[in-house]
Amino acid sequence: MNERIKMLRERALKREYGKYRNEEKSGEVYKHLTEKLHNSDMSDIERMAYRFEYLMNAETPVILNDEKFVFTRTITKIPHIYSDDEMNKIKNSHHIHELGYVCNICPDYAEIIEKGLNYKLEQIENAKNNNAGNSEYAEYLVRCIKATINLSQKSFRIFTKKAGCGIIKEKTKEQENAKIPK
């Protein structure tokens, strides 16, 4: 383990990233999402996509000088997509594995790193054109990918500004028109 890795490990063990958490903003985000999602007429997948988009938009990128691959969460309070009453109704008629709140995104990371998120968007668009991907799932997957891209671009702008690079670009028209929930 080299010195840089030792230092990063120590930082993680000491939970130093905690100082970047924004409890006030987290409370506002939690309140908004709870009101929007609970007892909503949105489908399950739409609720998950909406929550993901909103969280990605609410995040404030934190990039420390010695980090290369990073995403430090600043929003800490993330509500479930169902109210307790809704979840109890679901449990009455369905077997729920573990707590039932699994909402992870599990892509093929090797392919994403090699080919990028725009490649995934192209694959989804091609599938839609062939009617195989013309589904609610495809629509919300695209929204989640675009939210991830927007957060990455926001992080990149902060990083390049911090590093003093002259390559910061304004948002493109496509980025400005991206569907990010309010």
Image (cartoon, rainbow, N blue to C red):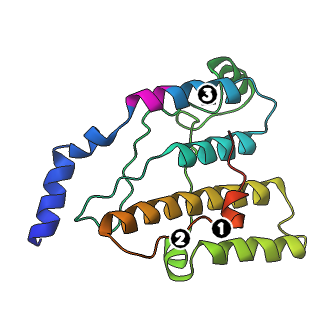
Q: Which residue is mark 3?
A: 32
Q: Are marks 1 and 2 in contact (CB under 8 Å)?
A: yes
Residue 159, position in %: x, y?
Answer: 37, 64
Q: Which residue is mark 2?
A: 169
Q: Which residue is mark 1?
A: 172
Residue 136, position in %: x, y?
Answer: 82, 53
Up/down of 129 relative to 102, above or below: below
Task: Give the structural element (helix, strand or loop) at label 1.
Answer: loop
Residue drawn at point x = 41 percent, y = 53 percent: 61
Up/down of 17 relative to 169, above or below: above
Q: Which quarter of the picture shows residue 67?
A: bottom left
Of callouts 1 and 3, the N-terminal one: 3
Crowd around label 1: few <14 · some 14–19 · many ≥20 (10 Å): few
Residue drawn at point x = 71 percent, y = 31 percent: 94
Horizontal arrangement in the rendering, residue 35 relative to residue 78 (left or right): right
Residue drawn at point x = 44 percent, y = 47 percent: 60
